[in-house]
Image (cartoon, rainbow, N blue to C red):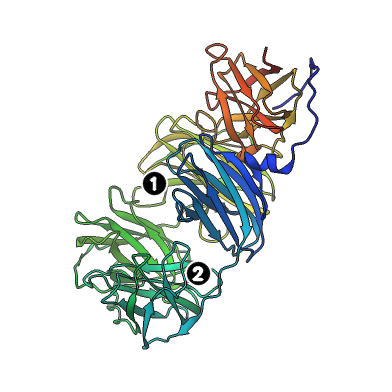
Amino acid sequence: MRSSFLLTVSTIVLLAAAPMAVAQTDGGVIQIGDRVDGNTGMMGREYQLELREGQGVEIVMRSSDIDSFLSIYGPDDANEALVSDDDGLGEGFHSRLRFYPRQSGTYTLKAEAIDDSDGAFQLSVAAWQPERVRSTNIRKGGNASGRLNARSPLTDSGNRFQQYRLMLAQGERVDISARSEDLDSVLAIGHDSPAFVALAENDDYAGEGLNARIVFTAPEAGAYAVRVSSFGSSAEGRFDLSVAEPKPMAEARPVTLGEEMSGELTDKTDTGFGGVSADRYALVVAAGQPHEISLNSDDFDSYLAVYDANGVEKATDDDSGGSLNASLIFTPEVSGEYIIEARSLGSSKGSYTLLVEAVEPPPAPVALPMDEEVEGELTDDDARASSAGRYDGYVFSATKGQRLQITLTSADFDATLEVGSAEGTFKALASDDDGMGNSTDSRLVFEVPEDGEYVVRASSYGGDGRGAYEIRMIDRGPAPQAGSLLVGSTVRGSLSEYDNTSDGGMMGSPYYDDYRFTAKKDEKLRFILVAPKFDAVVMVGSGEGEEFNVAKQDDDGLSETHSRLNWTAPRDGDYVVRVTSFGSNSTGDYSLIVEPQS
């Protein structure tokens, strides 16, 4: 919690705001048309790019110091990149990434080295629209012959291709194959839109040499683009394309509840909705009735998938059954027949057992009060999340924009938290495993997206943990904003559980306070952080909150628990100094001194 008091002010008073290009250099907002220089630092640089739906961009990153790597993250998911590129420019280790957004919003662009090394780079952002690709119509039951040559269009990775347009109904299945004596053929199918995004791809289908084949189920009605290319970017030659009615899927075997059913995947096993070899089982179930499905095998890495009658995927699992076995709890929203596919994650074959059991619906979640420590216990009688997993559910009401912190601590197991809407089938909107920074306890900060009721699930990592725990929820109020300070001043403040937390600290997700200041190029500054009750860490960099990029940091430069950091400003501009702790849950008062170096 910041409490800024200016005690002394030097003659160096920095008031000028940094020009836009300077802010962009070390992260922050970047726009189409900008060209900036930067340094990746230890963790790469992140830029915020506002894009409208259909507003394509081309981003180029050049560096003589590092093997550059570019990624773009969506407005709704900061954990999984939508697109990424390593050497797409085709000039040494330079990157080129082309992106066509399908929704408006603020995207995060990350520029880094592929091997976490540190180096300078040049970054440019330009408007880009995908070339309109001429497509030849093809239909189910149709065949076409084509040729890849110097006049064929190029993919972003530099491979020549030919494109075909295929109309499909929702749930319609097709068997697409590309054969060639000249090429190592590659097949892809995706939405027929300005920017092609593959929904399924294949290079060398098992048993067909260098030919490619895809058995595809359309997730929705509409036009799809089928692309034929080659594994080698310079390869040219003829190919034959066919779109056939796939072999009828084997009739699904009725599930016998509570009875372990045996099966075997072989080279003769038919493909299922997922386009790979799978045994199919039919489960008729009422809406809201949970069933536990377990697939065990000593011969292959088990994988489970559940589909509705139209082939739309409803649930999947890989390893929740322990080891390489699969297990999931399936609770349908609509009554009817569902298809369970028992398959291997890879190409391995062998014997397996499948068990489907109806389970008792979970008990109604209990109310989670605000700012009270609630004691609980995970037992074998709790609600099931998987074959071994158990959880306790808690419910609370919240309003849009609230920032809630939920902590789960236990001396008996590795705590895990999930939070989701109380409406319909549970789907986690946020989750945490080790947010407290001590490897076993969880801390989840949840910004409420809409007014309503939400459910928290308290469970153990891996699902097999049992024992006592404590859960607590607090309202952290509005996100603290960065304070400001002048060079030559001392700031007194306090870290508390109501402050921000970050994954960018030295240990887990420590609480932190940010302060903005302005410096001139080559100005030499010293930061001293003294904290009687915690092991102080001081950082300097650019950007605020989760967009903070660390340029330099210190833990014990003054003593075993106090910090001193000498730093030289690389350019004129605005910067941020961050106060945090080496112990991720430490709190207490501190004093921060910012002064010119002697």
Q: Look at 28% across and 53% down and name the residue there.
A: 325
Q: Look at 74% across and 40% down and name the residue there.
A: 19
Tag 1: amino acid = Asp
Q: Quadrant of the N terminus?
A: top right
Q: Report which quarter residue 142 is drawn in.
A: bottom left
As drawn, 148 above or below 450: below
Nearest to viewer (mark 1 / mark 2): 2
Disc 2 element: loop
As drawn, 296 above or below 214: above
- The residue to which callout 2 is attached is 196
State the image coordinates of residue 166 (x, y, percent, origin top left). Answer: 45, 82
Q: Quadrant of the C terminus?
A: top right
State the image coordinates of residue 56 (x, y, percent, origin top left). Answer: 61, 63
Q: Are marks 1 and 2 in contact (CB under 8 Å)?
A: no
- The residue to which callout 1 is attached is 381
Q: Which mark is residue 23?
A: none
Q: 10 Å neighbourhood of mark 2: few (<14), some, or many (≥20)?
A: some
Q: Is residue 375 visible?
A: no
State the image coordinates of residue 591 (x, y, percent, origin top left). Answer: 68, 17
Does residue 482 appear left or right of residue 510 in this picture? right
State the image coordinates of residue 104 (x, y, percent, origin top left). Answer: 65, 61
Question: Gap between marks 1 and 2, in whole Å?
Answer: 49 Å
Q: Is residue 405 visible?
A: yes
Q: Look at 38% across and 47% down and name the residue there.
A: 389
Q: Look at 69% across and 48% down and name the residue there.
A: 401
Does residue 117 appear left or right of residue 342 in this picture? right
Does residue 595 appear left or right of residue 245 in this picture? right
Tag 2: amino acid = Phe
Residue closest to the eye, 238 or 201: 238
